[in-house]
Amino acid sequence: MAKTIAIIGGGNLGKSIADGLLSNDFEASKLTITRNRIDFLNAYKDQGVAVTKNNKEAVINSDIIIIAVKPYKIEAVLEEISDEITTDKILVSVVSDFTIEQISNCLSVQPSIVRAMPNTAASVNASMTCMASKNASQSDMEEVTSIFNALGETILIDEQLMDAATVLGACGIAYVLRFIRAMIQGGIEIGFDAKTANKIATQTVKGASELLLKGGNHPEAEIDKVTTPKGCTITGLNEMEHNGFSSALIKGIKTSLDKIS
Ligand SMILES: NC(=O)C1=CN([C@@H]2O[C@H](COP(=O)(O)OP(=O)(O)OC[C@H]3O[C@@H](n4cnc5c(N)ncnc54)[C@H](O)[C@@H]3O)[C@@H](O)[C@H]2O)C=CC1
Ligand SMILES: O=C(O)[C@@H]1CCC=N1
């Protein structure tokens, strides 16, 4: 990760990526972050990161440009920086619902363009990042992959699945957090204080994830190990399903996808 990186749009996701990079010992002096209110980036400035409103200057000074503005702003940003984009730079867009072709159409020269869909867990090096490209060279793809590998896990997908990846991987953080919040609320109702309920719920979710990530089993195989016949687990699980637990999640995922595409 020796190259210089600019993050255009230091908001929720841009800052998560910056946090992950810096916690991986990426040299602060090789990172530039832009946004209009640079006073919101003082914490990064204090660490030696270049913070500026000037997107053109950020692009000129960087090898890899990560665009992290809201979808309705990307066209204006690409138009603004187009003259500074050269073919030796790598353009990475984490913007949802804006295709590689649309990006390409906004530029006068064609650098390697990569679409990446990380999530906010990049800040703690636990992102799931789905990536797609059409024209990136193998070495440029390896460069981008090494950045996002440092921030968690990466997979290459077909660009057609990028909206689905946005929903499952990026929105997924919110779905899981709402699940954890409900566990905490239930935990308080059955007797724990909020802090203890939070600790039990979050570690239990981490444990369930690790069982699948490290054990490689289907969730139901692990559920079978917990559900004692006539026991309290299956009784509670069935009550959740009678109330539409799995169905609500599946319908929500499909509704998110309908909204994005
Ligand atoms: N927040 C998330 O969990 C995820 C977001 N995304 C995508 O990332 C993009 C950014 O999302 P968020 O970080 O949530 O939005 P955000 O609004 O928190 O961040 C965008 C930042 O860009 C700045 N900005 C606006 N115009 C600018 C300009 N012309 N030049 C430089 N900076 C400018 C804003 O001040 C803001 O700080 C969106 O396109 C979203 O679809 C993708 C995956 C996850
Ligand atoms: O809610 C959104 O539209 C964006 C895309 C993925 C996460 N946040």
Image: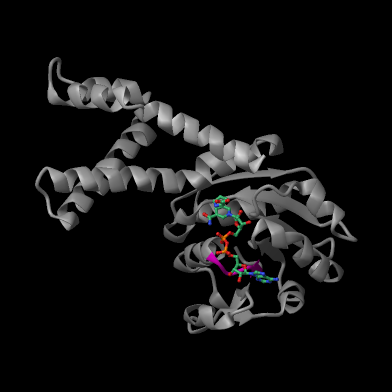
State the residue in front, 94 or 190. 190
Q: Residue at x 11, y 42 (%)?
A: 190
- In the rendered structure, does residue 124 fall within the stretch colored magenta? no
State the residue in front, 66 or 185. 185
- In the rendered structure, does residue 8 fall within the stretch colored magenta? yes
Horizontal and vertical percent for residue 158?
68, 35
State the residue in front, 189 or 39. 189
Relative to 242, is 113 on the left or the right? right
Q: Residue at x 42, y 58 (%)?
A: 124
Q: Tell me: residue 194, above or below residue 190.
A: below
Horizontal and vertical percent for residue 6?
66, 69
Horizontal and vertical percent for residue 163?
63, 40
Q: Residue at x 73, y 46 (%)?
A: 138
Q: Quadrant of residue 65?
A: bottom right
Whether residue 231 appears in this view of the structure is: yes
Q: Tell me: residue 198, above or below residue 162.
A: below
Q: Residue at x 64, y 40 (%)?
A: 162
Farthest front residue?
A: 243
Relative to 232, is 17 on the left or the right? right
Horizontal and vertical percent for residue 58?
71, 75
Specify the segment rendered in magenta.
Answer: 4-11
Q: Quadrant of residue 132?
A: top right
Whether residue 164 appears in this view of the structure is: no
Colour approach in the figure: one colour
